[in-house]
Image: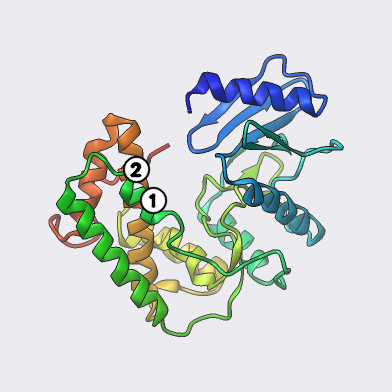
Amino acid sequence: MNGHRLEEIARAACEAVGLDPTGLTPIKVAENGIYRVPAHQIVARIAKPGQRSAAERELRIAEWLRASNVPAVEPADIPTTFVMVDDHPVSFWAELPEHRGGTATEIAGALRALHKLEAPPILTQVDPFVRLDQRIDAAHTLSVNDREWMRHHLTELRDRWTHRPEGLAWAPIHGDAWEGNVVTTNTGTTLFLDLERASIGPPEWDLTSTAIKHSSFGWIDRDLNDEFARAYGYDVTTWVGFTLLRDIREMRMTCMAAQAAGQQPELTEQAQHRLECLRGHCGSRPWTGWEAIP
């Protein structure tokens, strides 16, 4: 779906709920289209067809977090926060104040508060492999051999997950807790964004997102990793199951890059490099050359 068509959908959605779309501005155009509606300080988020239940669920999770006093992105203060346009679910959210990516300490504190909550019925059990089969199928820049290896590796990871060791008690988790999804406003409030992956699962799943920045990629140094562990009160890398969650996270990041390369040829080299690392062709961790994909 190109940007022009997504903008048309955003305009139609605004008009359907009585918002003025004048000055509609793209914030991000990727798997989901996100547009600012400046006349109302509202953000419209467009999901892919078939994602209606997920989009409505995300709004309900945001309401639950607000009621639980855990700061997060909030539904827009309008009578209708959800509408369908040509099979595309469109949700409306309050625009965030000025903010930056959360620090390791801030992310740890936010996760600690989230993990202490009692899980509501709306949360389902985490699926760490969601959409990976489809991403591999869409990885057209990879060779047939590479895709077969990925499918075999995915099968192995699923088996390891089935036999995962015991860890912390399962709790509400964010599911994708990196600094782009856990932000801090200029007034010092740290809040969660992108609640699509919120679920019930092992708290270690959230903690691994930060831990692999040190152990897998060297993006942060040991001191910052230790600071994160102290702020949360637990070092996930000492858990016997850490390597499993690390391997799944790395696989998710590789599948995402491989699928994206099918639409953005400039990412082909990055996708291939990530796969070569997983296949053991680039030495031991931490690997170099893993670059962030917007």
In three-dimensional space, the C-alpha distance between marks 1 and 2, rounded to whole angstroms, equals: 9 Å
Looking at the image, which residue is at 63% across and 69% down? 115
Query: What type is the residue that disc 1 sits on?
Result: Gln
Looking at the image, which residue is at 27% across and 30% down? 265
Query: What type is the residue that disc 2 sits on?
Result: Gln
Among all residues in the image, which is located at the extreme top?
22
Answer above or below: position of 240 versus 254: below
Disc number at residue 259?
2
State left or right for residue 57 relative to residue 108: right
Give the SS element for disc 2.
Answer: helix
Which of the 4 image quarters holds residue 37? top right
- The mark nearer the N terminus, 1 or 2, is 1
Answer above or below: position of 74 versus 156: above
Q: Position of residue 189 (x, y in %)?
A: 70, 48
State left or right for residue 263 relative to residue 104: left
Q: Position of residue 170 (x, y in %)?
A: 58, 77
State left or right for residue 97 relative to residue 212: right
Q: Position of residue 103 (x, y in %)?
A: 53, 51
Disc number at residue 134?
1
Q: Is residue 191 visible?
A: no
